[in-house]
Image: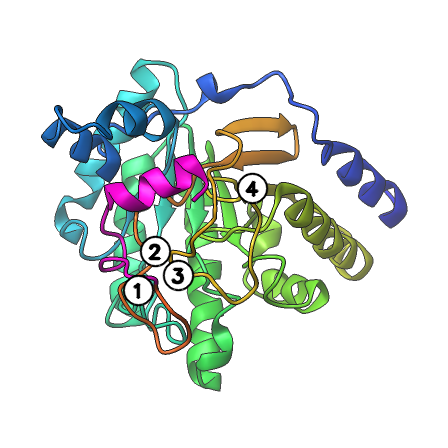
Amino acid sequence: MSKVASLAACLIGLSLQPAAHASSTFYVNPESAAAQWVKQHPDSPESAKIRAAIVNVPSALWLTGTSQTTDKLTARINLYVLAAQNVQKVPILVAYNLPHRDCSGGASAGGAGSAAEYRGWIDQLVNGVSYQQAVIVLEPDALADMQCLNRDNRDERLALLNYAISSFRQRAPHADVYLDAGNAGWKPAGLMADELNAAGVKNARGFALNISSFYTLAQSRDYGAAINAKLSADHDYTKSIVVDTSRNGNGAVPGDWCNPPGRRVGIQTQSLSPNLLALWIKLPGNSDGESSPKTDCHGGPAAGTFSAALAVRLIDGN
């Protein structure tokens, strides 16, 4: 297929018209922080609203080096993906454990202590998925945030992303892997395309956009199309796209990314076309952070902590 034909096929696939697969295809995470909060606060006036608007929507399970010990990761993931299979759903998993994680923002700093530790962690995750179906979102902000790393650490990060993608392809062949590519307001599309290619996205299902951010679906679609245009022109391939729509209902205020007021939940998890998925990756109500040297966190709790107040703000658009 020529570059022009390949790009045309991709752009056709990026239609905003819903495809055959709706939200019922994907697994509702029974372990989400919102589900746990509702269970613990059954009499709270916010519980019914949070249950209906957030808990019952398919969303991602985030996996970090501290969310469980590495030696138990394979067993935990195997149970999770099998539970999804048993109800004929596809689970959504986020791998978030690269060394030097969130080196610029700082609110979610951490990650594996070394490249060897990360490879071992990814191996356990891949083994847990095995031959089951899953959507894997690989390392939010890893490419968009590389400017805060030195050259050796950037090279290490690219090598680790290549390792992770190759490992899923070889040992978890039914998993659709999407490598994170930041958001429409972060890096120029051409630069992001180059970084995706260097990280091995050719061997993945595609790339993910807008994770934990607020840019509209249309903005993300256009940014993704520009990335694909560069991939097509320079490397003769294009890729499918995931957009995190969990909090983009009112769009973004550039630079205000840490629990910003006035945002709203977006369209619920679903397949919009064969090449475009809208997924709830960041759980609405989970804080972006308590503080950051770069921006105001608007009184939110520590990163990843669920807040009913934040959740209700997003449901109501306040």
For disc 1, the marked residue is 108
Upstream in the sequence, badge 1 or badge 3? 1
For disc 3, the marked residue is 258
- Callout 2 amino acid: Tyr
Magenta stretch: give its range: 298-318
- Do the residues under discs 1 and 2 have CB atoms within 8 angstroms? yes
For disc 4, the marked residue is 242
Q: Nearer the viewer, mark 1 or mark 3?
A: 3
The reply to whether residue 29 is in sight is yes
Q: Position of residue 57 (x, y in %)?
A: 39, 26
Q: Nearer the viewer, mark 4 or mark 1?
A: 1
Upstream in the sequence, badge 4 or badge 2? 2
Residue at the location (44% across, 46% down)? 137
State the mark number for residue 96: 2
Q: Position of residue 1 (x, y in %)?
A: 85, 41
- Callout 1 amino acid: Ser
Q: Position of residue 38 (x, y in %)?
A: 19, 29
> As drawn, is 202 to the left or to the right of 314?
right
Closest to the observer, 249 or 85 = 249
